[in-house]
Each structure stands twice: as C-alpha cells, then as structure tokens.
Image (cartoon, grey):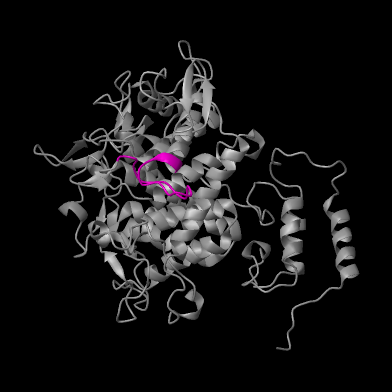
Amino acid sequence: MNQRTHNISLCSRLSLTACVVGLCLGWASPDAVALTNTEYDAAIAGVDAFLDRQMDRFTPVPNDYPAQFSDAQLIQSYDVPVADPLFASIYHRADIYDTALAAIYYTRRGNLDRARRLLDGIRFVQQNDPVKDSVDISIGDGRLRTSYWANDLLAPDRVSPSIDTFDAAVGNTAWAGIALTHYYNATGQQAYLDAAKRAADWIIDNTQQSKSDGFGGYSLGLDAANAPIAGTTLARSTENNIDVYSLAKNLAGLDGDPKWAAMANHAQQFVQATYHNQPGQEKYWTGTQPSPAGPIELAFFPVPTDTQTWTALAGLDTPDRLEKVIRWIADAPANDPTGLKVSDDIGDGRVFDGLRFSSGGQHLQVEVTGGYALAVWTGQQAGWLTEIAGDPAERWSDELQTLVNNLDAIRTTADGSDPAGLGLVATPWATGAPSGFSSSTYPNLRHVASTVWTGLALLASHPDTNQRDPFANPLAPLTPRLIGDLNSDGFVGIADLNIVLSGWNQSVPPGDPAADPSGDGFVGIEDLNAVLSDWNTGVPPNIELPPGVPEPATLGFMVLGLLALVGYHGRDTTS
C-alpha cells in the first residue's frame, strides 16, 4: 500500500482524503493531492478498457440485422457474474441511459467507431419499435424504451426489438437524443440528428403539459400500455425536465427550428418553479405530484442529487442560484440526514467520501459522485463558483480533487472492484446503496453509468491543466461544430489535418469516420477542403505550437504538393 503525507494526515492511496478514521481532517481535507500522470493514465485506461469489455461481451452481434445496422449494438449495463443467480435478471440488460452515456464518452474520447455502433443500436430499436409512427407506419413513433437485451437487438421473431423494460421514460429518451446530437456535432452525419429530432418530437407529442396548472413541463413518459407512467401526467420529474432542456438546447443550436427553443424554455420554467429559496437550504425539489387539495403540488422528498448537479451542468438557472445549490451540498456535514454527502466506512481502514443518490438514500453512489465532481468543475470554469469570505483557500479545487481521488480509490480498492482496476462499482457498499425511491437499490457491481461519470470527471481533472477536456460536461449546450474540427477540440488546425492525412484514400468504413467530414464514405479532396476552409478557426487548445503556422492557402499548396509527391489515388469508380 503506497503511503503519502497529505497535509498533517497520513493518507493511503485507498483514498488520499478518505483515510483511516481518526487520522484525517474530514470530508474535503485542504490541499488535496492530485493524481500523478501515471496514476491518471491508469485511471482513464481502466475506464476505457471496462467500457470496451462491456461492449464486446456479446459480440459478434447476429448477422441478420439490416445492412446499415450490421454492427449496431447496445452496451451491457452491469458487469454481472454469469453464474450469479441473484443478478440473473440483469445479466443481458442494456439500459438506454447507459448506452447513451457510453456513446457520449466515446465521442469525447474520439473513439467514433464505438460511439457510432452504440448510436446505431439506439437508432435501430427506435426505428423498429412496435408502436408505429402515425404518418409512416413502417417505422416506430420515435420513443425509446427503458432497456433492451444487450446480446441481441431483435426478439426471437427477428422483427421486433428485444425490449427488456417497456416503459418509454422521458429522461432516458432525452439522454439518447443528447448522445445523438453529440455524435452529429462531431461528425455531421445527418441520420443521427434526425434520430435525435424524432426522440424530441415524441417527447413533445406525448408528454408536454400545459402551463395552466402553474408548472407545465414534461411528464414521466408512457408505460407498456401506453398510459402515463405513475398513472398520471401530474407526476413530473425535475431531473427529467433538465434532460429535456439539454436536448432541446442542443437541437436549437444545431437545427435552428424555433420549436426547439420553445421546448427548452418550457422545460426550464418547470425546473425553475421547483427551486427552494430558503437561505442555506437552497435546492431543487424532486418534481410534482397530484395534490389532495387539487390538482398538483410540489414533491419534496426525497431530494435527488442529480436534480441539483444536473441543473448546474446544464446551466439551466441563474449563476446565483446554481452557486447556492452547490454550496448547500458542499456545506452539509457528511452523513447528515438532511444532506447528500456521505462518508462510508466499509472496513479494513477504507473510508470513501462521496454523495448518496438522494436525501432518502443510503451509502455512496458513484454515478452521482462523479456528477457532483463535474458540477464543481463546471462552476469553476463558468466563474459562478468561487471562494468567498470564510472559505478555505482553494476550496473548490480541493473539493473536486477529493472527489476524483475517492472515485479512483473505489476503482481499485472497493469491494467488488476489478483486480485490474477496470471500471467502477455502482457503490462500494457490499450490500448495495438504496436510492431512497421505493425499493430501488444500486448493487455492488461494476456499472457503465458509474464508470462513464467517473471518466468524464477524469477528463475534466487531468493533472496537466492544459490537457483537461473543456467539453467534458455532457449536459452543456453544444456549440455548433466547425466542419473542419475533426477531433472536436474547438479549433481547426494541425491535429485535424493529420486525421485526414492518416485516413487518406480510404473508404469509410473501415476507415475512421472522423476523417470523412464530407460524409461521402471516402477520405479525399472534399475532406481536405473541409479542414482548409475552417483553418485556424475556433479557440486554440492550450498547447505549444511551433512558430510560423501557415495560412490556409499556403498550407493547401503544401499538402497538395505532398500528395503529388507520394502519388494521388482517387476513388476507384470502375469497381
């Protein structure tokens, strides 16, 4: 066990700030020590390898899918031991939310092939849903179900999708749409934007509620019988409306249809109506429910963690409100029954600090802990989360690093962790973490969503600040892409040119889709021109560039000269 001196405490790498009880100063000790580059590389590699393994668990996929979906798939949500009867019911389960998150992460990492395969899986089950579109009865109506079977996208009849949970929930559908917009923004491939728009249209057509009741917003979705989930449209989730807001903001920026801005505004007004403005207790309530006094009232308990952090990630409310909500989380003592912070002593000197799923939940839940880390980082980047009188120096940087360190310790030392450090369990608590909602409990199993949120937090907290991903926040409104920004770093330059040159003269697939911004299935002059037309546009990443970076025209002649030197081979049109 590696030992480090941390402030005045002796801390182990089990958690740099979550130490043996009695040795540490407490949750978010001052001067949290950053991961070394080696430790960081191991952590991000553990995330990548786990997601790859979960995707590959059931490949190769059956070969009777339509040609355009020949390698489409969804991702197994939990890493379940095959012989474990306790979890046999979720062995094949692919939650649409987990698949969407994994696709967003792969897009951010530049692994567009894996992102495409997952999003093709989403498009496939959307198109083949048994509830058909009212205009084109050959395709589904745009809904997405809560979960499917990861091992085969088609049911035994080889026609219907292999649905596991039939509810079409608004939040999950919105997250699928968000992932589709991220991929479209990275590649320009219209089919993915169209699928996102169909998901959004389904949400509007089936769940939008009138503002006449004082709240409006979007209800929970439709169940297997096509009736409102929970039996009433008066049950509405603040968290779900945040998801809808993020999807609509992306579509407003990418597509331009004014209905998307109206959709975002409708969801935003619902979320803002749930804000609780008591000093020191600022938070967003759970949502709405039927009222005995009629017809509708706020639902106060339990207070979900994601409702607070995702509002901050989406930038949905005023900076003043967002800061107060994050401070409410941060200021509460660990294990306070009304707060969200926990400090879980799981034995053998291992104490993990993080957040529980809700104010009614128990024990640390990794997914929401990663989300809180990203919310703290987002507040710092946006400038609304700063130190004030009474705050320790570097309070928020230490809060973020403490969270990242604990997540990394969970990856390697928690009960249920992978011996090679691949992926993260949903909770380090061996018997599971009750969510606070009904009987739902997150198991002590390695989990895709928990691993992705940790991976995104890692992308935002690289030890070298120049290598932090400025777009790690999955709920931030997308900036419409520059066509030539092939690596999605917000700038068109040498890195993008290299992507085209490395794929030169290749068909796509099997070539890298990022090298084909023209979308014509071939890497050639059109793709080179796409880069050159946007050359030197955007905000340069924080890297050292050599002096004398050429202008587009000069660069174009240089590249064409190079291609002439090595021999230009165009697409073979004779075959």
Q: Is residue 115 left or right of residue 468?
A: left
Q: Is residue 429 left or right of residue 2?
A: left
Report how many numbered discs are placed on residues in the image.
0
The answer to whether any part of residue 214 appears in the image is no
User: Is residue 413 found inside the magenta-colored segment of the image?
Assistant: yes
| Quarter-of-image position of residue 309 | top left
User: Is residue 519 found inside the magenta-colored segment of the image?
Assistant: no
Residue 154 vs 353, above or below: the answer is: below
Q: Which residues are magenta?
A: 412-429
As drawn, the residue found furthest toward the left would be 292
Residue at the image point whose x is 9% and y is 37% from the top:
293
The answer to whether any part of residue 168 appears in the image is yes
Residue at the image point whose x is 75% and y is 57% from the top:
498
Residue at the image point whose x is 53% and y is 62% from the top:
114
Residue 339, image x, y percentages:
29, 27
Return the residue nearer the eye: 57 or 173. Answer: 57
Residue 70, image x, y percentages:
49, 76
